[in-house]
Amino acid sequence: MKLPHPDKGTLVGRASNALGWSFLNNVVARLSTMGIGVALARLLGPKEFGAFAVSIVAMLAVLSFNFIGDALRDYLDPRSRIEAGL
């Protein structure tokens, strides 16, 4: 079964185009992060790479907590939902 391609001028077409670019961006970002990690593992010694790995894990944890905080604020604060038009 072949799905029709939505017209680029419509809202559905623009949304599907944006979804495709977002997916591509995520794939490239994750592959490049993995590639940089592999390259650094080969270039750095075990002690230096361990420090790098700990700092990356800490940064990702902080970013995750930030995202959770933003989501809770948007859910719990009625003003943020009104500003967003929800």
Image (tube, helix red, strand yellow):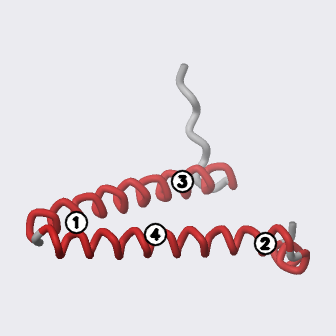
- Three-letter amino acid code at disc 3? Asn
- Mark 3–mark 1 contact, CB under 8 Å? no
* Left or right of residue 54, residue 65 in this image: right
Mark sitting on residue 60? 4
- Ranked by sequence position, the earlier of labels 4 and 2 is 4
Residue 28: x and y in percent read 34, 58
Q: Earlier in the sequence, mark 3 or mark 1?
A: 3
| Image quarter in which the N terminus is found | top right
- Residue at 20%, 70% in the rendered image: 49
Q: Which residue: 8% across, 69% down?
A: 43
The residue labelled by disc 3 is 17
Secondary structure of residue under mark 3:
helix
Q: In front: mark 4 or mark 3?
A: 4
Residue 55 spot, x, y in % from top left: 35, 76
Nearer to us in this view, 44 or 28? 44
Disc 4 is placed on an element classified as helix
Marks 1/4: CA–CA distance: 16 Å
Q: Which badge, 3 or 2, comes first in the chain's sequence?
A: 3
Who is closer to the viewer here, 57 or 79? 57
Pointer 4 or 3: first along the chain? 3
Q: Does 79 sit left or right of 46 as displayed?
A: right
Q: Quadrant of residue 75?
A: bottom right
Look at 57% across and 29% down and name the residue there.
3
Q: Mark 4–mark 3 contact, CB under 8 Å?
A: no
Q: Earlier in the sequence, mark 2 or mark 1?
A: 1
Residue 74's tag is: 2
Mark 1 neighbour class, 10 Å CA radius: few under 14, some 14 to 19, many 20 or more: few
Q: For mark 3, does the 10 Å Cα neighbourhood hold few (<14), some (14 to 19), or many (20 or more) residues?
A: some
Q: Amino acid at mark 1?
A: Ile
Foreground label between 3 and 2: 2
